[in-house]
Structure formats: structure tokens, C-alpha cells
Amino acid sequence: MPIWLIIKLKAFNRHRAKVTILCMLFFVLIFGSIAFYYFERDNEEVEDIWDAAYWVMVTITTVGFGDITPKTAGGRITFAFVALGGIGTLAYIIEEAVSISAKRQLEKMFGLGVAKMKNHTIIAGWNTKTEEAINELKSIGEEFLVVGIDLDQALLNSAGIVFIAGDPTKSGTLNRCNIKYATTLLIPLESDSETIMVALAARKINRDITIVATCDLQEHVEMMRGAGVNHIISYHIQS
């Protein structure tokens, strides 16, 4: 079996429950409208199929205006079907929507989500140099996020700073930062070796990104250039 087909099947299985629920709701809407119009077509309150569809929507959402009421046994049976099937299905969809929203909020709070921004700046690590970079980016209105392992999540949340919790030397973490669509990567780390690893991982994903990094030791400057760092801020050299 082709790999792409396996991936598609796995994705479908993950969303199968949601697809099933949506199909059930669609079925209730269509079947309920047709059945109600069939049984209540002589009802003066139901002029066409759209009145029946309106009645189904009102019933499912439990609004219950009372402007259309079933007069036949078939209409009442349809009401029971729509009420039991539609209301339960809609309630499940609302519950799922609330659950997804809460999950995304938690992911954002703990930096476990995936960034959606584009043409942004990524800052690897958190220290005094990072704070200086953030102030500069804020002053020019640049979108940015911070990525790192040992981040002060409470501080970042209180400051309203978007962050991704994870190892910036890993491609998986950088992909969560949407590095493919980022314009700049700032690496103000204190470890030159870690800086080089982050630069190599980033350059592998995005060949056009501009990488700016700090360098503590002069002998590491050329290594950083070889790793794809465009601009190096060093105690000995600036370029």
C-alpha cells in the first residue's frame, strides 16, 4: 500500500468520529425537512419545503417559536426523531467545539501548540539579550515568538508573548514555530555549540531565512558562518 494512502487513512481515522457526527446532523436536517413537509404539506403553516427546513432548525436549536406545529401523527413522529437525533447531535458538536477551544487555550498557555504566523521572527532561548531583542521588535511592530526549553511560561503569558516550548535544535520544534515561513531567526544563546546546532537545523528547513546569532568565542565565528549564520554579534567582531 502506498505511503501517502496510509497517511490519508490514519488522518481519516483520527477524524472519523467528527465526520460521523456531522453526517448524522446533515441526515437529520435533510430527512427531517423532507419527512415533515411530506406529512404536513396540508398544514396551512407549512407552505413549502423551506418552511419544513426552518421548523427542523428551530427544533434542533431548541428555540421553539411555536409558529409551526405538527398536526398529523407522521409530523409528530418526525418531531420526536428530529428532537432526539438532532438536539443530541448538535449538543455533541457544541461540546466538541468547546473542548477544542479549551485545548487550544491550554496549548497556547503552555507553549505546546503550533504557530500560525508568517513573515515573523523567531527568537531561540530566553535571557537578557532576548528581552532586548523583544523590545526592539515591538518598537517596529514585528511579529515574533520565543522558543526554548526552560522558559518562564508565567512571565511570557503575562506579557502576552507567543512562545513554543521545546528544543530549538530539533526540527520538530522549529516546524511548530512555522519556521518555513519565518523571515528571521535570532539566536542569542550563551552556548556557541547550541547556537550552531540551532542554525544548522533551521537552515535545513528554510534556506532563505536570515539568521542572526551571538558568539562568545572568536574561534567559533567561522564555524557559525559555515552553519549558515548570516550575521554574527561577537565581543571581538561584528558583521
Image: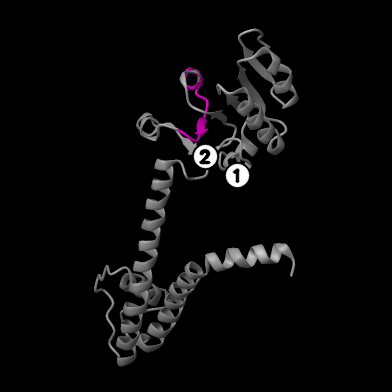
Give the class, few, some or many, for how many residues have Cα within 10 Å of label 2's Cα (few <14, many ≥20). Answer: many
Query: Is residue 145 a member of the stretch shown in magenta?
Result: yes
Residue 52, quarter of picture: bottom left
From the top left corner, tell me how far across and down residue 61 is, in percent. 32, 68
Q: Name the image quarter holding residue 84.
A: bottom left
The reply to whether dot 2 and dot 1 touch (C-beta < 8 Å) is: yes
76 sits left or right of 161 in the view: left
Q: Quadrant of residue 57?
A: bottom left
Residue at 37% from the left image edge and 89% from the top image edge: 39
Q: Does label 2 or label 1 sit earlier along the sequence?
A: 2
- Residue name at image x 69 percent, y 35 percent: 206
Residue 176 pos. (x, y %): 56, 43
User: Who is closer to the viewer here, 139 or 157?
Assistant: 157
Q: Amino acid at mark 1?
A: Gly
Relative vertical location of residue 217 with respect to residue 208 in this rendering, above or below: above
Q: Is residue 47 magenta?
A: no
Extent of the magenta region: 130-150
Q: Is residue 63 left or right of residue 98?
A: left
| Residue at the (40%, 74%) spot, across then down | 53
Name above or below for residue 125 compared with residue 61. Answer: above
Q: Label 1 neighbourhood size at 10 Å, few (<14), some (14-19), many (20+)?
A: few
Q: Mark 2: which secondary structure?
A: loop
Q: Quadrant of the C terminus?
A: top right
Residue 148's place in the image compared with 212, above or below, is below
Residue, disc 1 = 172
Residue 166's disc number? 2
Looking at the image, residue 92 lies above or below residue 115: below
Residue 198 percent location from the top left of the image:
63, 31
Marks 2/1: CA–CA distance: 9 Å
Q: Nearer the viewer, residue 180 or 215?
A: 215
Left or right of 26: which side holds 193? right
